[in-house]
């Protein structure tokens, strides 16, 4: 590596070599680009190798495939195709793939979109390219608030619904003093602020909060403060590995055993499964779907389990519902024209395993019931994946912002 | 000139060396001009931005022997400043990118001033620590938008009349920045200043004994590298119309090391080839079932074990020996 003696012949040969290899690569890629055929193409874009690989991951792709199969495999006589990609949690990679899908590969709709930064980027892009996107895995309520757009939808949940569910319903159920463990960045603040508002609306009190750095490993001092506060509920306004780590360590400190309740503000079945019941028992959380709710959801859950060896979370069921609703809208519109399909999506009711009596607002928000769950004790769990006890059902109109409250200019 | 490896006359060798480099440069330029018609333009623009970023990094590692482990701080700062300038201040895209580059240069001056006081691993650690501080600011500062990043940056109109929302003008804009940056780096490496940098790399004690103010040379090289990296970041934020934490995390510092190592440290073309490979892998493997990170990690290991000079380095070495 310590050399810079440039041989003259070297450079010339290098040029020739480069030219040859690039020409071959160009031919190969050029050929593959020409294959973009018609049919209806749906892109599933999410994290398949990083921290959210279980949260949504390739299981969401499987859920999308199930939706296509249940719909019959074709719509308006055109074959339906699912493509998928791993955005690696990087908005630039996500944006690059989405652009290429829209511009070159003829993808008609992009869904899943875990991670708010990627979802916001694709949301912006879909507006520019006049294509439909249905966000499932991202949390930020900005998608249907100040960043809303006419062809963008938000399906499963958002920060508002989580706050109403865990904050509001839990306070109503008697958890009226709170202490927050908040990730020290905007997402954490927003979650804490939203939840605080609802806790106060229900007559509860916030005794204090402590901020921990992002991607923290040691929560001991924060958990001790939470314990000392004697609040009935310890709210975890964080996500991903931070939540998992804080739940684990809270269990080691005996927080739930000592009578305090842990409230995970952003958790799904996949994280509970990863933690195990021993560590996560007593945790309270909000989800939009649980496989063991009723016959309809059990039927879907078991079919999903057969294919993937795991039960679906609200992200997976939400992706299924989003794809199915899109296909129904295409059929009803009689074409895959973006304007017409978007109008149909907003017009048709959503009634499937995920959204019971759901409706879509003009800002793209799919409004449906949310559920407040408590994680069972290991001895109460009677079968594999028997994790949740239903505490309360939060009606959709209460869980989500109304059009006027959302701050979205679309009327 | 095609097969002679033992050219006897020195002047002839120099002359053909110049023309060889010129030919290489023209060949690459021709490829780049043809690229948007062969490949997806946004993808090629991304490769160009990363190639320029890696080339700036390579100026330090390849020609001064300084391993900076915090170059993402400059790349990200450039991206954020350019994004803010274009979105909030509504400045001309070129002005935005230049502002990004200047901002990165100023940051480079501060970081470099502290870091070059130490050598080797300590130098790398200081750059890493300072870049983590910059990352922290990016997470907290209100104007960066936290983990959402700055979204929906308008590409705008270059000089007020060239619409950069069209793919080809945008490509031309990025290509011009790339060519200008690469040319500047090439000139620096081949200037008397560059000779002194290489002397410092090869034997710092001797450079000092010859009377060179080594610290000042290192600092200047550091600032130039930071500014070019920041300009690349600024261009990238306009291409994707977003600037986010990805640009400024330490993983990005690692990625630029990978790109440079894979392509060939201390070669002009190495970072470009490395960027083509890594970015292509990231994008085209994304749609396969293989976990991208595992594959890139494997390639990194293979590169370190099997061809330490990097791809361009090995090819040059092999051609030179034939």
Image: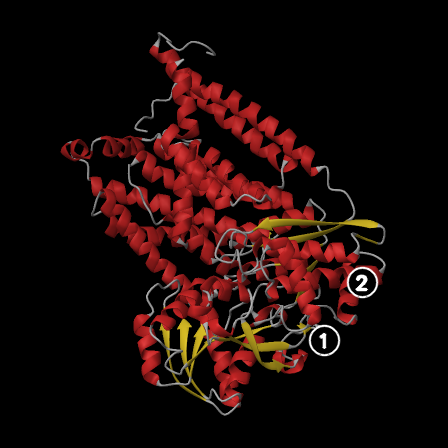
Parent chain of label 2: A
Q: Of marks 1 and 2, which one's residue comes earlier in the chain?
A: 2
Give the spatial CA distance, label 1 vs label 2: 17 Å
Dot label at residue A157: none
| Residue A256, image quadrant | bottom left
**B114 relative to B289 in the view: left or right:** left
Parent chain of label 1: A
Secondary element under disc 2, as helix, strand or loop, is helix
What residue lies at 61% left-to-right and 26% top-to-bottom? A24
- The image shows residue B316, relative to residue B140, as above or below, that is above
**Can you give x and y, in whole percent of width and height, for residue A52 in the image?**
51, 58
**B47 relative to B136 in the view: left or right:** right
Task: Looking at the picture, tell me which residue is in the foreground, A391 or A246.
Answer: A391
Q: Quadrant of the C terminus of chain B?
A: top left
**Can you give x and y, in whole percent of width and height, for residue A361 in the image?**
71, 74
Q: Nearer the viewer, mark 1 or mark 2?
A: 2
> Can residue A135 be seen here?
no
Task: State the residue lying farthest toward the top.
Answer: B8
- The image shows residue A126, relative to residue A192, as above or below, that is above
Q: How many marks?
A: 2
- According to the picture, the residue beneath numbered tag 2 turns out to be A340
**Can you give x and y, in whole percent of width and height, for residue B158 in the image?**
58, 50
Do the residues under discs 1 and 2 have CB atoms within 8 angstroms? no
What residue lies at 53% left-to-right and 89% top-to-bottom? A172
- According to the picture, the residue beneath numbered tag 1 turns out to be A411
């Amino acid at each position: 590596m310590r050399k810079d003696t440039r041989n003259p012949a070297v450079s010339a040969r290098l040029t020739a070599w480069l030219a040859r290899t690039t020409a071959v690569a160009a031919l190969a890629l050029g050929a593959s680009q020409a294959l973009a055929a018609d049919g209806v193409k749906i892109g599933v874009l999410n994290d398949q190798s990083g921290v959210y690989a279980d949260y949504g991951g390739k299981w969401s792709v499987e859920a999308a495939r199930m939706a296509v199969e249940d719909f019959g495999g074709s719509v308006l006589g055109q074959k339906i195709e699912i493509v998928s990609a791993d955005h690696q949690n990087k908005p630039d990679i996500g944006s690059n793939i989405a652009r290429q899908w829209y511009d070159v590969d003829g993808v008609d709709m992009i869904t899943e979109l875990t991670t708010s930064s990627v979802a916001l980027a694709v949301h912006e892009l879909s507006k520019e390219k006049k294509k439909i996107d249905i966000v499932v895995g991202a949390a930020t309520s900005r998608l249907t608030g100040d960043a809303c757009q006419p062809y963008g939808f938000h399906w499963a949940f958002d920060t508002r619904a989580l706050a109403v569910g865990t904050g509001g319903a839990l306070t109503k159920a008697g958890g009226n003093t709170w202490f927050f463990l908040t990730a020290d960045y905007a997402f954490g603040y927003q979650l804490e602020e939203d939840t605080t508002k609802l806790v106060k609306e229900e007559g509860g009190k916030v005794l204090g909060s402590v901020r921990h750095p992002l991607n923290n490993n040691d929560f001991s001092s924060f958990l001790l403060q939470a314990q000392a506060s004697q609040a009935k509920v310890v709210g975890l306004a964080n996500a991903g590995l931070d939540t998992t780590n804080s739940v684990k360590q809270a269990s080691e400190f005996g927080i739930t055993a000592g009578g305090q309740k842990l409230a995970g503000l952003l958790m799904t079945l996949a994280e509970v499964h990863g933690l195990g019941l021993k560590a996560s028992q007593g945790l309270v959380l909000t989800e939009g779907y649980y496989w063991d709710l009723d016959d309809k959801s059990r039927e879907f859950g078991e079919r999903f389990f057969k294919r993937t060896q795991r039960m679906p979370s609200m992200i997976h069921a939400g992706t299924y519902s989003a794809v199915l609703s899109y296909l129904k809208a295409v059929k009803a519109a009689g074409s895959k024209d973006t304007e017409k399909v978007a109008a149909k999506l907003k017009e048709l009711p959503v009634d499937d395993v995920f959204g019971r009596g759901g409706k879509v607002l003009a800002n793209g928000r799919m409004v449906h019931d949310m559920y407040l769950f408590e994680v069972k004790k290991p001895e109460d769990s009677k079968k594999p994946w028997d994790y949740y006890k239903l505490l309360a059902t939060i009606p959709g109109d209460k869980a989500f912002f109304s059009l006027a409250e959302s701050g979205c200019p679309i009327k | 000139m095609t097969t002679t490896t033992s050219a006897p006359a020195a002047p002839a060798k120099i002359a053909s060396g110049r023309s060889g480099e010129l030919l290489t440069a023209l060949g690459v330029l021709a490829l780049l001009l043809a690229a948007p018609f062969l490949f997806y333009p946004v993808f090629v623009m991304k490769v160009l931005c990363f190639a320029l970023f890696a080339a700036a990094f390579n100026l330090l590692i390849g020609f001064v022997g300084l391993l900076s482990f915090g170059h993402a701080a400059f790349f990200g700062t450039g991206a954020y400043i350019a994004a803010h300038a274009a979105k909030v201040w509504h400045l001309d895209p070129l002005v935005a990118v230049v502002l990004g580059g200047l901002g990165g240069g100023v940051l480079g001056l501060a970081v470099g001033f502290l870091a070059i006081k130490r050598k080797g691993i300590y130098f790398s650690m200081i750059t890493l620590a300072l870049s983590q501080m910059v990352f922290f600011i990016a997470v907290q500062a209100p104007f960066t938008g936290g983990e959402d990043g700055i979204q929906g940056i308008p590409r705008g109109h270059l000089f007020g009349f060239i619409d950069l929302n069209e793919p080809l003008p945008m490509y031309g804009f990025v290509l011009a920045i790339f060519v200008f940056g690469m040319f500047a780096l090439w000139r620096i490496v081949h200037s008397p200043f560059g000779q002194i940098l290489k002397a410092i790399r090869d034997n710092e004690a001797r450079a000092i004994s010859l009377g060179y103010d080594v610290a000042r040379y290192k600092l200047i090289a550091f600032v130039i590298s930071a500014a070019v990296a920041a300009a690349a970041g600024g261009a990238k934020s306009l291409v994707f119309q977003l600037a986010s934490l990805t640009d400024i995390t330490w993983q990005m510092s690692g990625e630029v090391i990978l790109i440079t190592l894979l392509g060939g440290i201390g070669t002009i073309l190495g970072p470009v080839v490395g960027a083509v490979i890594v970015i292509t892998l990231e994008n085209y493997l994304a749609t396969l079932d293989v976990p991208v990170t595992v594959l890139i990690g494997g390639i990194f290991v293979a590169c370190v074990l099997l061809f330490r000079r990097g791809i361009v380095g090995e090819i040059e070495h092999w051609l030179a020996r034939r």
